[in-house]
Image: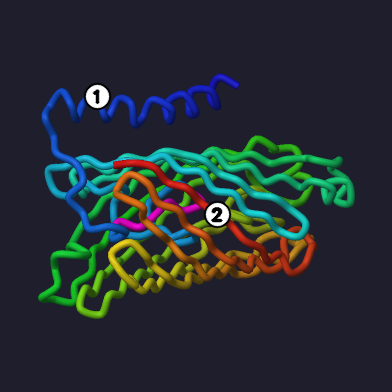
Amino acid sequence: MRAKTGLAGGAALLLTLTASQVAAQGLETGGKLLLTGGVSTVEGAGGGGLASWATTTGYGTEGEVGGNVHGTYLKLPDYEFSTWGAAVGLFDRVELSYARQTFDTGDTGAKLGLGKGFAFHQDIVGLKVVVAGDAVYDQDRWLPQIAVGAQYKKNDQGPIIAAVGGRDDQGVDYYVAATKVLLDQSLVLNGTVRMTKANQLGLLGFGGPGKDDYSAQFEGSVAWLANKRLAIGVEYRTKPDNLGFAREDDWADIFVAYAFSKNLSVTAAYVDLGDIATFKDQRGFYISLQAGF
């Protein structure tokens, strides 16, 4: 319990400490164009809803600091998923993030033999570093913004994960993301390659029966900036298939993001997550709120 409290406590202090340092050092905030930094993913990093982007969270450009807090809720036919978290972008170069995920089996838990209302929880701590390019300002060349990142994930249901065939209840994902904003075409393009062992993001553990190797998975996003406040797009994310008892399908969504200002935005999406833990056709809607600077 101390480790979890420490992670959550650190996340709660993240934006407060950063805001204090910004004020003390006289740093600027908020230089990016609306929506070009993305929103918050289900794993806490800046990007789309499903895909991590190469952009850093918040609206800080070079020499500036940005950050946000977010909350997301997803209702599926047989499950409920929610996540909340915080992230800080430093000088448009480094991003630190934290997310707390809850996967609630509801009535389905009894059918799975776990008990009604059984829930999996997962803490995710992320680091992203921009290594080349600028997604917005490099309009005169095709080089995208490129970032490398890592996410440490820790699940709280180790015995259940072992029972369903997962090799571990914690793991680390590594990824490389490339993001390009084409202002003349009002498009945002992103492609990410993730090395992972995670089953359903890690909510069902890492690895599987006789299998504990990393596999390369793809995350793609295309968004149209309809105007300075509204973005409409699609995402696709491939998934590993490590567990023997249930197939894991790729994920996809269609989303709409609206920025009321640089301090508040909302994202709504229709998602198709395929089969999850033997229950088929898990499609539904999610909504995510993000507040920051």
Residue receiving disc 1? 20
Q: Which mark is residue 158?
A: none
Residue 11: x %, y % from top left:
43, 31
**Left or right of 272, for residue 237:** left
Q: Position of residue 60 (x, y in %)?
A: 21, 46
In this view, which residue lies farthest toward the front? Answer: 260
Question: Callout 2: few (<14), some (14-19), or many (20+) C-alpha neighbours within 10 Å?
Answer: some
**Left or right, 139 with reference to 222:** left
Residue range in magenta is 37-43
Spatial CA distance of label 2 from label 1 is 30 Å
Residue at point 45%, 61% (across, down): 51
Secondary structure character of the magenta stretch overall: loop
What percent of the width, then of the height, locates residue 262?
29, 49
Determine whether the residue tagged by mark 2 lies in a helix, strand or loop: strand
Q: Which residue is mark 2?
A: 287
Task: Please say whether residue 170 is one of the residues in the magenta stretch.
Answer: no
Above or below residue 119? Residue 14 is above
2 or 1: tag closer to the N-terminus: 1
Residue 124 position in % (x across, y down): 49, 41
Element carrying mark 1: helix
> Looking at the image, which residue is at 60% across and 66% down?
271
Identify residue type, mark 1: Ser
Identity of the amino acid at label 2?
A: Ile
Q: Quick check: is 40 in the magenta stretch?
A: yes
Rendered position, 47 above or below 28 = below
Q: Nearer the viewer, residue 36 or 143?
A: 36
Nearer to me, 143 or 74: 74
